[in-house]
Image (cartoon, rainbow, N blue to C red):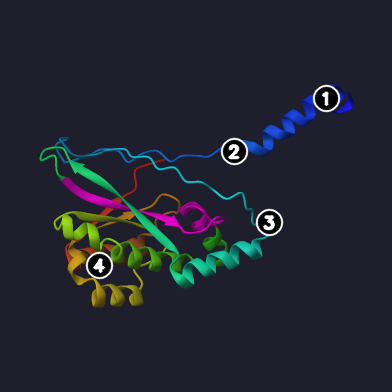
Amino acid sequence: FYLQIVKGQYYLDNYKLQIRKTREIAGTRGNIYDRNGNPLAYNELAYSVTIEDNITADTRKEKNRILNEILDHNLVSYAYQPIVDLKTKSIYAFEALMRPRSTIITSPVDILRVARSQSQLYRVEFMTWTQSIAQFHAFHETFPKARLFINSIPSIPMLDDLTRSLEQAYTEYLPLLVIEMIETDEIEQHYLETKQQFAKHWNAHIAIDDFG
């Protein structure tokens, strides 16, 4: 009687809190237009379902350890979202979307949040560039002219060691890049200029993330 009648509503509400979670889903990319307002590319939206293990990292120390493990061993994979040219109906580009291989740090937002607290955003930037290009190889073989949108942190400059690494290993991909500045950090003008110089040198492009 006490459990079902007196405290019934309390235990029901508590049970719901344990099994229900709310997830914020970022808005999709908008269409891309030329200077005359004519559409160049649009999205074909795709969904994926991820089963999350119900594990929590209660301490900052544990999350920091997991982030370092991800960065040390490049424990990320990438989903390549196609961007379609409206005029030709062909794939214009792919956007590299990071997927951490972790049951605790499960999204790019989580990685950025923990990395920012550790002053390790520069390592995330390095991993994002090198791994998204490296894993793009299979798509490049099928779509050799398709560009690659890479999400870049605007508060991090174009690092010298990153530039050297890219130019040594991925020269053939550099003219296909679109450096897309994410909205989670404010743009530092001087740092943006370093990426503009890199893009100009390799005939790449700069874009601003348009969701949110």
> Which numbered tag is attached to residue 4?
1
Sequence order check, earlier mark of 3 and 1 = 1
Assess whether mark 1 and mark 4 are in contact (beta carbons under 8 angstroms): no
Please tell me whether mark 4 sits on a helix, a strand or a loop: helix
**Label 2 sits on residue:** 21
Tell me the mark number nearer the camera, choosing from 1 and 2.
1
- Tag 2 and tag 4, C-beta contact below 8 Å: no
Q: Residue at x 64, y 64 (%)?
A: 62
**Left or right of residue 151: residue 39:** left
Q: CA distance from mark 2 to mark 4?
A: 42 Å
Q: What's drawn in magenta, residue-wise? A: 91-113
How many other residues sit within 10 Å of disc 4, few (<14), some (14-19) or many (≥20)? some
Outermost residue, front direction?
A: 1
What residue is pinned by disc 4?
198
Instruction: Tell me the residue at 65%/61% (across/down).
Output: 60
Q: Earlier in the sequence, mark 2 or mark 3?
A: 2
Q: Is residue 172 left or right of residue 56?
A: left
Residue 101 highlighted magenta (yes or no): yes
Assess disc 3: are there few (<14), some (14-19) or many (≥20) residues with their C-alpha within 10 Å of its C-alpha: few
Q: Quadrant of the N terminus?
A: top right
